[in-house]
Image (cartoon, rainbow, N blue to C red):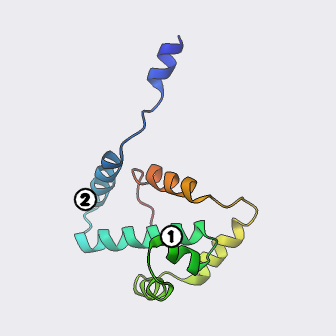
Amino acid sequence: MEHLQQAQLPQPRSLKQQVTALIGNFLAVGLPYEECVKAFRKEFIVLVLLAHKGNQCKAARALGMHRNTLNRTMHELKIDRRTIGDVRLKLAAKPALKPAQYRQRVVVQAGEQFPTI
């Protein structure tokens, strides 16, 4: 019986499988390449900002870029700071993710239907 229960559990997917699923979702809705890249960059930056409670300095460091570059990229991608702040307030009661937990969550979510912002 225990063997059957283990077989029914979803198997973890590799990063390549998750990326392939994400690309498949983009292709299914007919998004051109540039729009796919823009949507991915926007969602990724928003998730990093949320993981750092809207702190742009910490988020920029986690992204490996300067704070001014992050600010310019946010403007380019039309990421509204107020939206990040509103979501941050709603999440204030929840404990912040540690960087390792954040990376794990991003990899897990990468294979799911890509949300719109």
Q: Residue furthest top?
A: 1
Looking at the picture, which amino acid does disc 1 mark?
Ala
Give amino acid for label 2.
Leu
Instruction: Specify whether residue 109 is in view.
Output: yes
- Residue carrying label 2: 27
Residue at the (27%, 53%) spot, across then down: 24
Q: Is 24 displayed left or right of 9 in the figure? A: left
Q: Nearer the viewer, residue 31 or 56?
A: 56
Few, some or many C-alpha atoms within 10 Å of disc 2 (few <14, some 14-19, many ≥20)? few
Question: Which label number is shown at residue 74?
Answer: none
Question: Element type at marker 2?
Answer: helix
Name which quarter of the figure residue 95 lies in: bottom right
Label 1 belongs to which residue?
A: 62
* Other-residue count near label 1 (Cα within 10 Å), few / some / many at <14 / 14–19 / ≥20: some
Which x, y percent locates residue 83? 59, 78
Residue 116 relative to residue 58: left or right? left
Q: Position of residue 63 (x, y in %)?
A: 46, 72
**Vertical relation: 21 (above or below) 54:** above
* Closer to us: 73 or 1: 73
* Residue 32 seen by the camera: no
For label 1, the SS is helix
Q: Residue at x 51, y 75 (%)?
A: 61
Between circles 2 and 1, the one closer to the viewer is 1
Image coordinates for residue 44, horizontal then vertical, percent: 45, 67
The alpha-carbon separation of the residues under discs 2 and 1 comes to 29 Å
The residue at the point 48 percent across, 89 percent down is 68
* Residue 50, picture quadrant: bottom right
Lower position in the chain sequence, tag 2 or tag 1: 2
Residue at 37% x, 67% y: name it: 40
Please determine whether, in this image, residue 7 is positioned above or below residue 38.
above
Vertical comparison of 9 with 14: above or below: above
Contact, mark 2 vs mark 1 (Cβ under 8 Å): no
